[in-house]
Image (tube, grey):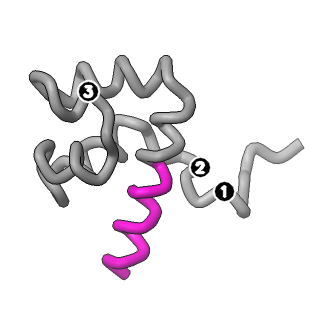
Amino acid sequence: MSNEQPNNPLHGIKLATIVETLVDYYGFEELSKRININCFKSNPSVKSSLKFLRRTPWAREKVEKLYLRVIQEST
């Protein structure tokens, strides 16, 4: 069985990379406006955001979708 996932654009991309890319692109203030979650509003950091997103599938899904839009715009 192959480990490759050709239909998954996020395959091989770490959550930390996704969050860092979004923070670099938008900053925490704008990111909190686009995705209304407290980890981007109240004392935000990449570390605290990762902790929250790993435990909260609905929030992680929103972050991943925004990341895909950002990388699509960049190409």
Q: What residue type is labelled 2?
A: His
| Residue visible at 31% across and 77% down in the picture | 74
Viewer-nearest of discs 2 and 3:
3
| Residue visible at 49% across and 18% down in the picture | 55
Quadrant housing residue 41: top left
**Secondary structure state at the residue bearing disc 3:** helix
CB-based contact (under 8 Å), mark 2 and mark 1: yes
User: For residue 8, which numbered disc appears in the image?
Assistant: 1
Q: Which amino acid does label 3 sit on?
A: Cys
Q: What is the chief secondary structure element of the magenta stretch?
A: helix
- Where is residue 24? Give x, y as percent: 15, 53
Question: With 38 as the anchor, is 59 left or right in this view?
Answer: right
Quadrant housing residue 25: bottom left
Residue at the disc numbered 2: 11
Task: Please tell me how crowded label 3 is: few (under 14), some (14-19), or many (20+) other residues with Cα within 10 Å.
Answer: many
The span picked out in magenta is 64-75
Q: In this view, does 74 lie above or below 66?
A: below
**How far is the residue under mark 1 from the one under mark 3?**
26 Å
Residue at the disc numbered 3: 39
